[in-house]
Amino acid sequence: MVPVQLPSRAVGPARAVTRRLFLALALIALTAGVVYLDRDGYKDAAGGEIGLADSFYYATVSVTTTGYGDITPVTTRARAVTTILVTPVRVLFLILLVGTTVEVLTEQSRTALRVNRWRRRVRDHIIVCGYGSKGRSAVEALLGQGMGRDDVVIVDVDPERLREANRDGLVGVLGSATRTTILQEAGITRAQSVVVAPREDDAAVLITLTARELNPGAIIVAAVREEENVHLLRQSGANSVIRSAQSPGRLLGLATRNPRVVEVLEDLLDVGAGIDIVERPVSAEELGGPPRPGAGELVVAVVRSDELLRFDDPRVCGLNTGDQIVAICTHRSTG
């Protein structure tokens, strides 16, 4: 089984086969009903009367072109019915049979071609390991920042979560992100970033180690539940570690005394609405001097060689090439 699952609205092979099966049975039932209504026009080689079971038997062997010849039309009307109705039904039945087989094989070939084409073109994408609540929130933030759905790949061991990702228009890879082969299926060597959001901290550490080994230049962001595991993730190669267990508790504590501050923080986290916090490169006009905020922009920090300089640091007044400015902006100004 190919682990890569592309989003698609096409009818699946199983559903297509089931639908055609019901149609084939309906054709047999229709033929049997016509034969039963005109049962006096048919002859049984055994000499018995034509009953409902005999009608279904005749319809089955006739439509499937088996034709044992033990039940035959003997009147002109019965032969006309066979010519006008049963013969086209036979042809339609064969079309259904052949068409179903061809569609299943074609769908499989089409899926394989789509996967191969996706493998060839995917690059500079973001891999999200885990499509639980943390993974879905990360994807929502990425989409809110303008990331296209084609540039996000989900890796998860749960088939239902992967189907949910497909319904959301995202490419999914079924399997554990701790395995090298699964990350390679997700295009790890050409990925821009990796979001590590599994349920357990030990899995997060192993995923980070594997991803860093396969792509030394990727930006790896990991979520961790326990504070004591933060240093393990950093040593494993994570650029940023988000403490998922402590952050909600801190917001709860802050909200008891400063509820409006929490509202602002939630607004910042709600990407694509209200106010956003963004990171942008230094412009040519800002080199050598302080930041020059644009309309609706408030500079809060500068990143220089992986060091965070807060807005009150004197070094912020002399911006260098390669510096990144962290600013709070309105959503309208970021668009």
Image: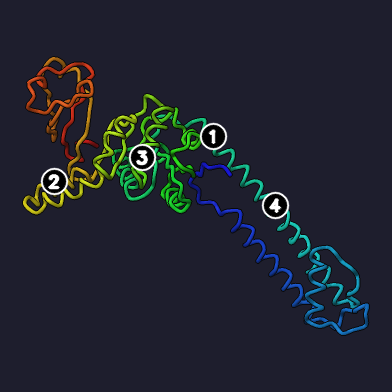
Q: CA distance from mark 3 to mark 2?
A: 30 Å
Instruction: Name the one closer to the observer, 286 or 178.
Output: 178
Tell me the element at label 3.
Answer: helix
Compared across the picture, whether 221 is left or right of 263 comes to right
Q: Which residue is mark 2?
A: 264
Tell me the element at label 1.
Answer: helix
Q: Residues within 10 Å of mark 1 (few under 14, many from 20)?
A: few
For residue 308, above or below residue 12: above
Tell me the element at label 2.
Answer: helix
For residue 33, above or below residue 17: below
Q: Residues within 10 Å of mark 3 (few under 14, many from 20)?
A: many
Tell me the element at label 4.
Answer: helix
Q: Percent position (x, y) of residue 213?
A: 41, 27
Q: Residue 204's mark?
A: 3
Which of the two discs, 3 and 1, labels the residue nearer the N terminus? 1
Q: CA distance from mark 2 to mark 1?
A: 44 Å
Q: Which residue is mark 4?
A: 101
Instruction: Name the one closer to the observer, 326 or 187.
Output: 187
Q: CA distance from mark 1 to mark 4?
A: 24 Å
Instruction: Name the one closer to the observer, 60 or 315.
Output: 315
Image point 38% across, 24% down: which residue? 216
Q: Which residue is mark 1?
A: 117
Image point 61% across, 47% down: which residue? 107
Three-letter code, disc 4: Thr
Which of the two discs, 4 and 3, labels the residue nearer the N terminus? 4
Disc nearest the viewer among 3 and 1:
3
